[in-house]
Image: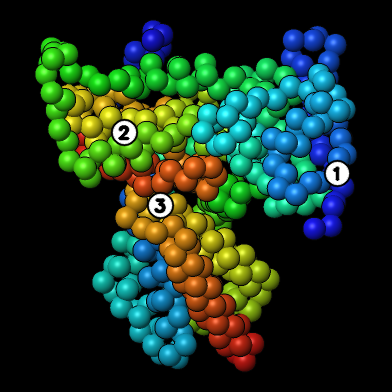
Amino acid sequence: MSQRELAIHIFRYNPEDPNDEPKTETFTLQEEEGMTLFIALNKIREEQDPTLKFDFVCRAGICGSCGMLINGKPTLACKTLTKTLPDDITLMPLPVFKLLGDLSVDTGTWFRDISLRTESWIHTDKPFDPEAEEERMSNETALQIYEAERCIECGCCIGGCATANIKPDFIGAAGVNRVARFMVDPRDERDEQAYFDVVGSEDGIFGCIGLMACDDNCPIDIPLQGQLAYVRRKMAAAGWKR
Amino acid sequence: MELQRTYISGKKTDFLVELVQTISGLLLVAFLWTHMIFVASILLGVNAFNALAGFMEHYHLLDAAVIFIILAVGAHVGAVLRRVPGRWQEQKMIWQHARTIKHNDTWSWLFQAVTGSAMLILIIIHVFIVVYAGIDSTLSAERVHSWMLWFYIVFLFLAEYHASVGLYRALVKWGYVKRHSLKRILTIVTICTIGLGLISLWVFYSLGGSA
């Protein structure tokens, strides 16, 4: 493999420093075999600029920390091989989330807020008996829940969503997917009207304008179009009866 | 929860407006395609076109169509206006966003908003002309054989594009479809309807020239 020289243009800004201005800084480095952006960014930080801010934990597409705009596409840096990219690579932080500095954003506060607003926990009046055997559910249901539960909360669906970019209260695909997960769960005793209170509005499913950037960009391929449509149809039925 | 939010929470209005937007949109697509097929009756000859036009006027179908289009367009515009970013700041953000993420369906939505706004003006002009002049092949041929040709060509492209993207988005949002095959099918349908429209215009243009 002939080694390319990569020009990596990185968004730099420290919102904590009142004298700092947002700018793009270019770093050049030699491409290596099997190089991911995780490796590239660490090399830049070690060899060229120790002040560069970016987030990584698992470097295996599981933790969802390294979501960023890679040549505009919201995706995970650790899963992106440099060989799939041109010689010039532009990296920007995910929009919508609070910018901590350079490529690092705070997705946690946003997702915590969504969890509370969509009431993402099992609602049940049954008293909990730690001795009792767990209730059974069909394998099909379990798989359906698991499909939604795979979300790693990287925020790529939110950063890529035009609606989320201009409407701060919109819960986005991640929020709707979360609600879909509880809708199929037989242990959750909420009826459709209770769900309608949570997502049957412009801030919820009826705020989605169908751009499907979430579906196109989800790094772990959760079928978000299907999840959004499922919740939309359920909430339409609930809204009709209201 | 803040006070101003308690007024709007748990109401079904957001859902109803969404429903009005979808249903009026679907009806307008059906109307547009029927309309274009009717106009294409000129391909069967002047007599076929005039017979169809006469039939529609005799049974007041033309009046019904005008009333329908005013109501449907009114409802659709009313419903979709809430979607168009109204503030200058939002406009800047949304165009920058589209440029940054380079995502086709995001661009197509922006074009949908632009074509929709332009069409509102074109539809008003078109309806006025038809209501005041009536439908007749000679009148149409004369109009098409003038500078108005450009009006119809632009209108044709905008309307078919807007209808196609709108139908795509409605079906994608409500599910039941495979997104990428739907896009292919609608692209072919749109090329065919634009082609049919252009051929009809060409026939009118040559009729106007020979008169």
Chain of the residue under label 2? A
For the N terminus of chain B, which image quadrant?
Answer: top left
Image position of B123 (left or right of A78): left
Q: Which label lies toward us, 2 or 1?
A: 1
Residue A237 or residue B61, whichever sits in front: A237
Taking the spot 33% from the left edge, 37% from the top edge, the residue there is: A146
The kind of residue on which mark 3 rests is Val
Dot 2 or dot 1: first in sequence order is 1
Classify residue A197 as left or right of residue B78: left
Amino acid at dot 1:
Gln
Where is residue B64 shown, x and y percent of the image? 31, 61
Identified at 44% across, 52% down, the residue is B169
Same chain for labels 2 and 1? Say yes or no. yes
Q: Which residue is mark 1?
A: A30
Q: CA distance from mark 3 to mark 2?
A: 20 Å
Regarding residue B65, the answer to whether it shows in the image is: yes
Residue topped by disc 3: B172
Q: Secondary structure at mark 3?
A: helix
Badge 1 marks a residue whose secondary structure is strand
Percent of width and height locating residue B210: 62, 92
The picture places residue B207, in percent across and down from the top left corner, at 57, 88
Q: Name the front one of labels 3 and 2.
A: 2
Q: Mark 3 near mark 1, Cβ–Cβ under 8 Å?
A: no
Look at label 2 and name its amino acid. Answer: Arg
**Quadrant in the picture for the C terminus of chain B:** bottom right
Same chain under badges 3 and 1? The reply is no
**How many neighbours does mark 1 have within 10 angstroms: few (below 14), some (14-19), or many (20 or more)?**
few
From the viewer's perspective, is residue B16 above or below residue B114?
Answer: above
3 or 1: mark nearer the eye: 1
Q: Which residue is mark 2?
A: A181
